[in-house]
Image: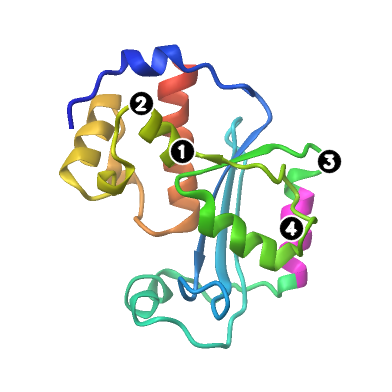
């Protein structure tokens, strides 16, 4: 991956203050059968929220292998999770930023209900930003050589973050955002 960081200098985000970085983990990639298992949110100012949600249903084999073992015994009901997120975000209606927002927004919509998201319905997909600056987001995986170089070039220590952990993935995305768009 040949990265030209000057490309980011040309990008000026529309919103620079009212942002929340989000990530979710869920029981299955199939949104018809899957449910949200955990939610990580980090505001631009560093305030954080992490919630795990009670789930008694089935989980995909991949989720059983990579996600379930990282979860704790501290689980919220769906109603409690909604209340926690709403209290965390308040009335601010931030723009939500996710690495690949498709699944995060689908699962959060399933949780909150259509039209009831606590952030703007038009989320910011960081993978699209990478794509627009010439980086193939498919190859931009946490543990890929290209991603490791990208993080290293930004001065980010990946060892601080657990991969596929909703809060750590949201923290990592916030740190990347700060390095690319705020720390110039």
Looking at the rendering, the stretch of residues picked out in magenta corresponds to: 79-87
Q: Which picture quadrant has residue 158?
A: top left
Dot 3 falls on a residue whose secondary structure is: loop
Within 10 Å of the Cα at label 3, are there few (<14), some (14-19), or many (20+) other Cα atoms?
few
Q: Which mark is residue 133?
A: 2
Q: Which mark is residue 35?
A: none
Q: Which mark is residue 126?
A: 1
Check disc 4 and report the residue beneath it: 84
Position in image of residue 65 (x %, y %) = 32, 77
Q: Tag 1 or tag 3, which sits nearer the N-term?
A: 3
Which quadrant, please, contains the C terminus?
A: top left
Position in image of residue 142 (x %, y %) = 29, 48
Check disc 3 and report the residue beneath it: 91
Q: Which label sits in the foreground, 4 or 1? A: 1
Q: Which label sits in the foreground, 4 or 2? A: 2
Residue 80 in the magenta stretch? The answer is yes
Dot 2 falls on a residue whose secondary structure is: loop
């Amino acid at each position: 991956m040949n990265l030209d960081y000057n490309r980011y200098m040309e990008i000026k985000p529309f919103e620079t203050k009212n942002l929340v970085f989000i990530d979710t983990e869920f029981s299955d990639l199939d949104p018809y059968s899957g449910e949200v298992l955990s939610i990580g949110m980090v505001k631009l100012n560093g305030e954080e929220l992490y919630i795990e949600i009670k789930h008694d249903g089935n989980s995909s084999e991949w989720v059983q292998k990579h996600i379930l073992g990282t979860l704790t015994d501290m689980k919220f009901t769906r109603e409690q999770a909604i209340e926690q997120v709403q209290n965390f975000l308040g009335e601010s209606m931030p723009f939500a930023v996710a690495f690949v927002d498709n699944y995060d927004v689908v699962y959060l919509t399933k949780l909150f209900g259509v039209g009831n998201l606590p952030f703007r319905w038009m989320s910011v997909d960081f993978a699209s930003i990478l794509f627009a600056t010439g980086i193939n987001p498919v190859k931009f995986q946490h543990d890929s050589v290209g991603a490791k170089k990208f993080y290293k070039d930004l001065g980010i220590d990946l060892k601080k973050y657990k991969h596929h952990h909703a809060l750590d993935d949201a923290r990592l995305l916030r740190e990347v955002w700060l390095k690319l768009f705020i720390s110039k």
